[in-house]
Image (cartoon, grey):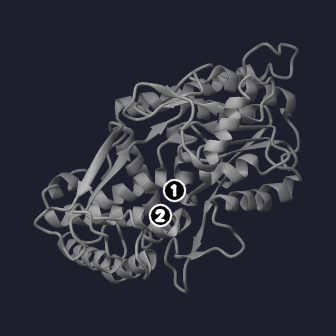
């Protein structure tokens, strides 16, 4: 089973929690005449970004107002409230520890639905440069999964030595390289919205309790690991039908004290805090609500992707919930309108995000006074908004602002520019 949090992890979490009382005390001054007092501890905020947020809080905070009408802020979760992606790190943890609960038959069915029947994107290639055939990839993965289940069985959570014991297992090595490759291939070939759904399908067979324990185990393990680039590859002696695959990803997960303290400050000032994520809602809720991580949000304030069973009692299901959007891109705007605007009568006061999936909600509401972009130096639609934020840098009341971070450490920087992983030079834009 999972180990308890290490001293370093406990110190990090305790550091977040210890800031909250001070914030609540500071928040009591916000409605006084002492407008020069800071609402947020400086930590590693970019000063202009922190001042812009504080100005909005001072102008719109309404402590004690009716919950149905008071202002609110909406945050993306992955790479906004935390450094990293909680669903992707969980999926890799499941692969590495073989924590799937679907039968080989169900595994094959979900895999085929995910890969589809057409060709994969041209970028999906083997080590030798050949296009990967999706049918061959599925055949290899089902055969590997069947063999692994026969050897190790189905378990919702394994003891901490499992990965070490299977590190030299060539079947396990090939399986994990090809399965995570399949996820990225789905993203490249059919879009992120399709791949996000597929990851949730692969959670089937778990219970809400076993999934919660699995998420906690994944979080604990990843918070204690170095931020680094990791490569999974197929053993050369086991190319299978699809060929040898080498797949590289970033291993990273960190808490963000600046966001945790901001959440506390907003709530103290009568501004509600909501999360709208493209990850499965139950995964995000574990992270956002567990006091050990420092964010302490109510479960009902976390919105995300939902699923429903298809004619049986399986959890979490493999069908979209009727009348609830996939909370990605424009779906985030739809979810906010359904869940919040309809009830409160107005859009979010502030919105926080980091990627193309957040652009629509960052700019989609006339009521939004400020949009904060966690700067990842990306191109595309979020890159265009980032350029606008950079142009508004000297403006007294900007609509968009940037917040930089150091991707080598997972920590924020007191500057709008970001240091990309593997670099030492700050960059403002892509």
Q: Secondary structure at mark 1?
A: helix
Query: Left of 69 or right of it: where is 195?
Result: left
Mark 1 and mark 2 lie on one chain; the one further toward the N terminus is 2
User: Is there any visible trace of residue 264 in the rendered image?
Assistant: no
Q: For marks 1 and 2, give the one nearer the viewer.
A: 2
Residue beneath the point at 75% across and 47% down: 363
Label 2, residues with CA under 10 Å away: few <14, some 14-19, many ≥20: many
Which of the image's four quarters has the C terminus?
top right
| Count of number-bearing discs | 2
Query: Left of 363 or right of it: where is 414?
Result: left
Q: Is residue 269 or residue 320 the one in the foreground?
A: 320
User: Is there any visible trace of residue 378 in the rendered image?
Assistant: yes
Residue beneath the point at 60% across and 24% down: 45
Disc 1 and disc 2: Cα gap in Å? 20 Å
Q: Is residue 289 or residue 178 the one in the foreground?
A: 178
- Numbered mark located on residue 283 in the image: 1
Task: Please provide percent x and percent y for residue 218.
Answer: 39, 50
Residue beneath the point at 85% across and 33% down: 60
Query: Height in image: 319 above or below 52?
Result: below
- According to the picture, the residue beneath numbered tag 2 turns out to be 187
Query: Height in image: 163 above or below 243?
Result: above
Query: Left of 237 or right of it: where is 204?
Result: right
């Amino acid at each position: 089973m999972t180990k308890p949090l290490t001293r370093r992890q406990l110190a990090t979490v305790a550091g977040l929690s210890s800031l909250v009382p001070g914030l609540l005390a500071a928040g009591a001054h916000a409605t006084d005449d002492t407008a020069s007092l800071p609402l947020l501890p400086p930590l590693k905020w970019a000063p202009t970004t922190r001042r812009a947020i504080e100005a909005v809080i001072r102008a719109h905070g309404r402590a004690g107002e009716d919950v149905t009408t008071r202002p609110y802020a909406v945050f993306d979760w992955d790479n906004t409230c935390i450094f990293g992606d909680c669903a992707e790190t969980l999926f890799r943890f499941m692969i590495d520890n073989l924590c799937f609960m679907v039968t080989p038959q169900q595994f094959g069915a979900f895999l085929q639905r995910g890969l589809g029947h057409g060709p994969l994107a041209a970028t999906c290639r083997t080590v030798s440069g050949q296009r990967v055939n999706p049918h061959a990839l599925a055949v290899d993965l089902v055969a590997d999964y069947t063999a692994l289940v026969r050897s190790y069985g189905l378990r919702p959570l394994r003891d901490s030595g499992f990965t070490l014991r299977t590190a030299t297992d060539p079947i396990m090595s090939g399986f994990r390289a090809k399965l995570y490759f399949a996820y990225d291939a789905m993203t490249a070939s059919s879009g992120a919205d399709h791949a996000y759904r597929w990851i949730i399908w692969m959670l089937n067979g778990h219970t809400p309790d076993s999934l919660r324990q699995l998420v906690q185990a994944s979080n604990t393990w990843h918070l204690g690991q170095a931020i680094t680039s990791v490569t999974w590859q197929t053993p050369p002696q086991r190319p299978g039908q699809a060929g040898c695959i080498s797949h590289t990803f970033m291993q990273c997960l960190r808490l963000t004290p600046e966001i945790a303290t901001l959440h506390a400050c907003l709530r103290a000032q009568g501004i509600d805090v909501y999360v709208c994520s493209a990850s499965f809602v139950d995964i995000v809720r574990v992270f956002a609500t567990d006091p050990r991580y420092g964010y302490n949000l109510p479960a009902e304030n976390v919105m995300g992707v939902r699923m429903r069973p298809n004619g049986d009692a399986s959890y979490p299901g493999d069908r979209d919930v009727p009348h609830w959007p996939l909370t990605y891109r424009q779906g985030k705007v739809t979810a906010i309108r359904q869940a919040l605007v309809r009830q409160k009568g107005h859009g979010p006061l502030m919105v926080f995000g980091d990627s193309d999936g957040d652009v629509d909600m960052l700019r989609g509401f006339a009521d939004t006074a400020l949009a904060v972009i966690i700067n990842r130096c990306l191109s595309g639609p979020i890159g265009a908004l980032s350029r606008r934020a950079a142009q508004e840098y000297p403006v007294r009341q900007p609509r968009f602002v940037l917040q930089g971070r150091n991707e080598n450490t997972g920590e924020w920087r007191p500057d709008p520019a970001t240091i990309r992983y593997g670099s030492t030079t700050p960059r403002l834009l892509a």
